Amino acid sequence: MRKIPLFFSSFLCVLCVFFATFFATGCSLLNTNVAKNQQNSTNSTKQTANFTVKSFSVTQNNETKTLHISKNGETYHFALFDGFGTPLAAKTLQNGKFKNDKFLPPTGELEPFFEAILAAINRGEKSVNFNDWSAYELHQ
């Protein structure tokens, strides 16, 4: 089995940090507002969690992903990455409504999971299980 050259693995680490920072801070070139009203949606989510940035290790179907949540005022930015650092979803929650960010496809099925994580943060919990998703907070 061939080893990955050190410069290549270092490059991947730098690239992952760049994408995490870019998406987690909400630096957006394009914001697409997708109006979706869901029953039992964000109306039940209270935006009271007091933090700046939180990171979670997320597992679904034996695949590990990383979720970064940042808070700016009453706006929450969610960025979900696969194991290689490729962005899978970028969403913003503001005034109880989600909107898609960046050049990523709409991911409305993740909104209830993101709400469950915010609810767990509000309760002071470090982990959450929601349907086939599980997440635990990474140490900062």
Image (spheres, rainbow, N blue to C red):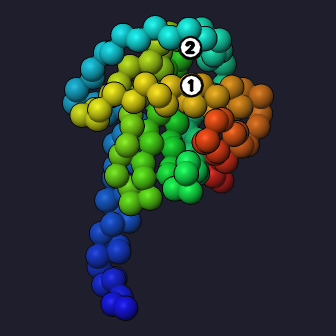
Q: Is residue 15 left or right of residue 115?
A: left
Q: In terms of depth relative to the viewer, which is nearer, 80 or 39?
A: 39
Amino acid at circle 2:
Ser
Q: Which quadrant: the N terminus?
A: bottom left
At a point 30% along the width and 84% down the height, the residue shown is 5
At which x and y percent is residue 58? 57, 48
The amino acid beneath tag 1 is Pro
Q: Is residue 29 left or right of residue 127?
A: left
Q: Picture coordinates of residue 82 (x, y %)?
A: 42, 53
Disc 1 + disc 2, Cβ < 8 Å: yes
Is residue 64 shown above or below 119? below
Kindly identify which numbered label has been placed on residue 31. Answer: none
* Residue 6 spot, x, y in % from top left: 34, 82
Residue under the point 38% across and 55% down: 85
| Other residues around mark 2 within 10 Å, as few (<14) / some (14–19) / many (≥20) | some
Say if residue 91 shows up in the picture: yes
Q: Nearer the viewer, residue 27 or 98?
A: 98
Residue 124, compared with residue 99, is above or below; it is: below
Tell me, for residue 112, which label it has, or none.
Answer: 1
Q: Identify the secondary structure beneath mark 2.
A: loop
How would you rate the neighbour count of disc 1 (Cα within 10 Å): few for under 14, some for 14-19, many for 20 or more? Answer: some
Q: Is residue 3 above or below residue 67?
A: below
Residue 36, picture quadrant: top left
User: Label 1 to label 2, Cα distance in Å?
Assistant: 7 Å
Vertical placement of 53 versus 123: above or below? below
**What residue did someone put label 2 on?**
41
Tell me the SS state at disc 1.
helix
Where residue 75 appears, as percent x and y from the top left, is 49, 20
